[in-house]
Image (cartoon, rainbow, N blue to C red):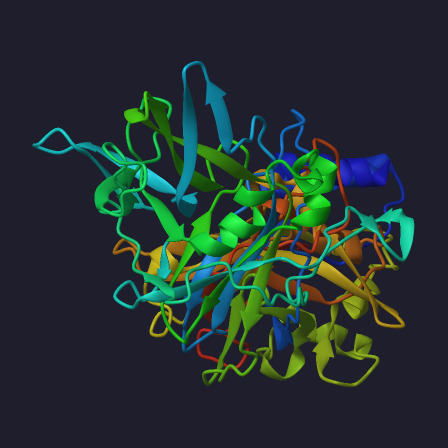
């Protein structure tokens, strides 16, 4: 009853409990509510609580698509699978790749007999193609549709080296050690790949939106002689649903290896069913090499057209002469179990009076609320009268000590909370480009259960007050990145009025889509361990002039 009354007051007058009192009856609260609105019995003020910030190194994260939450409409989440190198002197260097199973297409054959002749199949090229995430800018003056590549990170002038391997590890949705449990793959899982499938000469590229709408390659010209060794230029395109070419990454694979592993075995038992195929060819691995380059996101969903394409020619022979040459392809699309791979450099120099937050297998920050610093309060500050509540004698009134303060003599409320905001200022000297920073951070609770077990749960404001919880990057009028702010009024109120006793540290991380506690349509109290957002930001710590802090605005009954 008391709790509901307080919540109602918060909606009317935005007032929450800071120093939880004991309410003897409904009328007492009504008097207070009237006094707040008329502002004749109450005064308002603000107080800052100091924080302690420490870095949490992320060794790995859950990186597979096996346990991803199902959305309300039973749809699957769109996952960004990053490929490339992202070198940032104020964050970990990331070399990102991924592994994916392939779908076995139907109708595979390499020979055909026709009436009064023969058809000869020849494999010309094998290409791994990955459509970019791109935005159409419309047609130019020549009528050609142009594009902008989205979310590209890193050095756009440096070539990125990519290697493609055959995956030797059988990917299983069930845990081999305990088949009753769901399997999971970490971002640093060792697949022990050894067989290189990309061409021996290597493959490097610089992503270019309008150049990469066409892949040019050599194909043997069999229009006159099926045994010809002459080449002719040909092209490969990826078309959208309006038959307009879109930009894509094309990686040529070793023709001899792919012919031996695939083409020559299409009629063998390994290609007789999806189960046989998945056991024979366990997937494909893409890895980035080198120390610099670009980091590019790809969508591997069934509708993305990501695939390994076998481009071949059918030469139709009649009367011992070439009658026609038909160019076709078999596409092994990316499907099934897909896992991200993040290779990171764990040595990151931390700038003075700052800390770093980075997504994927990057860096999080532990946020401890020290409390009201008694040594920095002015002589007339009303909080000084509660100095005796500093039971651990550290000159701070922490949240647990604040919760113990009650107006026992009058059995009434002492203080009411209007707002509780925790703010992290961006070090925009080091993180100056808002476009490449995380557009949102996330704050949650972290409770150490012992035995290396940590329970991560959502702050109540994230699902009770979704519109105001935020964590979104704020910028100045000149688009300079400024700060990230979280409104945690419910969280603080629950601790101080006794509704919650979880006085645990908070954790700050780069926001991922899976951090939405209501993503499935139902509340999931636990924070999921996924993160495919590699962006990073440098923030000022608790020792800076622009220090991170928790600010509480309150209403106090006048003496």
User: Residue at 58% of width from left, 47% of height from top?
Assistant: 469
**Res 508 quadrant in image:** bottom right
Q: Is residue 495 above or below residue 310?
A: below
Looking at the rendered structure, the number of numbered marks drawn on it comes to 0
User: Residue at 49% of width from left, 35% of height from top?
Assistant: 331
Q: Quadrant of the C terminus?
A: bottom right
Where's residue 528, x and y in %?
Answer: 71, 51
Res 78 seen here: yes
Where's residue 177, x and y in %?
Answer: 89, 58
Q: Residue furthest front?
A: 319
Res 151 seen here: no
Where's residue 76, x and y in %?
Answer: 62, 34
**Relative depth, front residue between 276 and 124:** 124
User: Residue at 63% of width from left, 84% of height from top?
Assistant: 375
Q: Quadrant of the N terminus?
A: top right
Q: Is residue 74 above or below residue 413?
A: above
Q: Is residue 139 left or right of residue 507?
A: left
**Relative depth, front residue between 266 and 105:** 266
Q: Is residue 23 left or right of residue 285?
A: right
Where's residue 138, x and y in %?
Answer: 21, 31
**Relative depth, front residue between 127 and 37:** 127
């Amino acid at each position: 009853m008391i709790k509901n009354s307080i919540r109602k007051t918060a909606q009317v007058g935005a007032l929450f409990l800071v120093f939880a009192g004991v309410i003897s009856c409904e009328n007492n609260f009504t008097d207070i509510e009237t006094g707040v609105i008329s502002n004749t019995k109450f005064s308002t003020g603000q107080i800052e609580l100091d924080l302690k910030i420490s870095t949490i190194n992320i060794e790995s994260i859950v990186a597979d698509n096996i346990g991803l939450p199902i959305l309300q409409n039973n749809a699957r989440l769109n996952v960004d699978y990053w490929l490339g190198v992202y070198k940032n002197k104020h964050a970990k260097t990331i070399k990102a790749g991924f592994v994916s199973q392939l779908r076995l297409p139907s109708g595979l054959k390499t020979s055909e007999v026709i009436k009064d002749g023969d058809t000869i199949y020849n494999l010309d090229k094998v290409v791994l193609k990955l459509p970019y995430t791109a935005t159409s800018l419309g047609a130019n003056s020549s009528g050609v549709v142009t594009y902008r590549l989205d979310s590209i990170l890193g050095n756009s002038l440096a070539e990125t080296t990519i290697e493609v391997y055959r995956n030797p590890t059988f990917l299983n949705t069930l845990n081999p050690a305990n088949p009753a449990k769901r399997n999971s793959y970490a971002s640093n899982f060792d697949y022990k790949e050894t067989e290189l499938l990309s061409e021996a000469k290597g493959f490097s590229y610089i992503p270019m939106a309008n150049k990469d709408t066409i892949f040019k390659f050599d194909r043997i010209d069999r229009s006159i002689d099926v045994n010809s060794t002459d080449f002719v230029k040909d092209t490969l395109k990826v078309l959208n649903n309006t038959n307009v070419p879109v930009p894509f990454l094309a990686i040529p694979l070793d023709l001899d290896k792919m012919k031996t592993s695939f083409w020559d075995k299409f009629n063998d038992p390994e290609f007789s069913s999806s189960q046989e195929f998945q056991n024979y060819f366990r997937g494909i691995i893409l890895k980035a090499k080198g120390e610099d380059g670009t980091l590019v996101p790809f969508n591997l969903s069934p509708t993305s057209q990501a695939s390994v394409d076998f481009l071949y020619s059918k030469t139709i022979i009649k009367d011992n002469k070439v009658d026609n040459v038909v160019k076709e392809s078999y596409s092994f699309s990316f499907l099934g179990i897909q896992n991200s791979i993040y290779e990171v450099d764990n040595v990151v120099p931390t700038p003075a009076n700052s800390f770093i937050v980075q997504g994927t297998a990057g860096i999080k920050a532990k946020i401890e609320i020290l409390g009201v610093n008694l040594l920095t309060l002015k002589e007339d500050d009303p909080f000084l009268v509660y100095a005796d509540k500093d039971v651990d004698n550290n000159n701070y009134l922490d949240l647990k000590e604040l919760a113990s303060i009650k107006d026992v003599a009058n059995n009434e409320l002492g203080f009411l909370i209007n707002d509780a905001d925790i703010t992290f200022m961006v070090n925009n000297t080091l993180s100056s480009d808002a476009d490449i920073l995380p557009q949102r951070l996330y704050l949650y609770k972290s409770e150490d259960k012992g035995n290396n077990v940590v329970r991560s749960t959502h702050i109540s404001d994230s699902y009770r007050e979704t519109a105001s919880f935020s964590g979104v990057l704020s910028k100045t009028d000149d688009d300079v990145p400024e700060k990230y702010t979280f409104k945690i009024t419910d969280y603080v109120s629950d601790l101080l009025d006794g509704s919650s006793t979880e006085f645990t540290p908070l954790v700050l991380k780069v926001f991922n889509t899976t951090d939405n506690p209501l993503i499935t349509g139902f509340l999931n109290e636990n924070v999921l361990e996924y993160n495919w957002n590699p962006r990073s930001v440098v923030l000022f710590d608790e020792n800076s002039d622009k220090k991170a802090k928790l600010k509480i605005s309150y209403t106090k009954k006048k003496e």
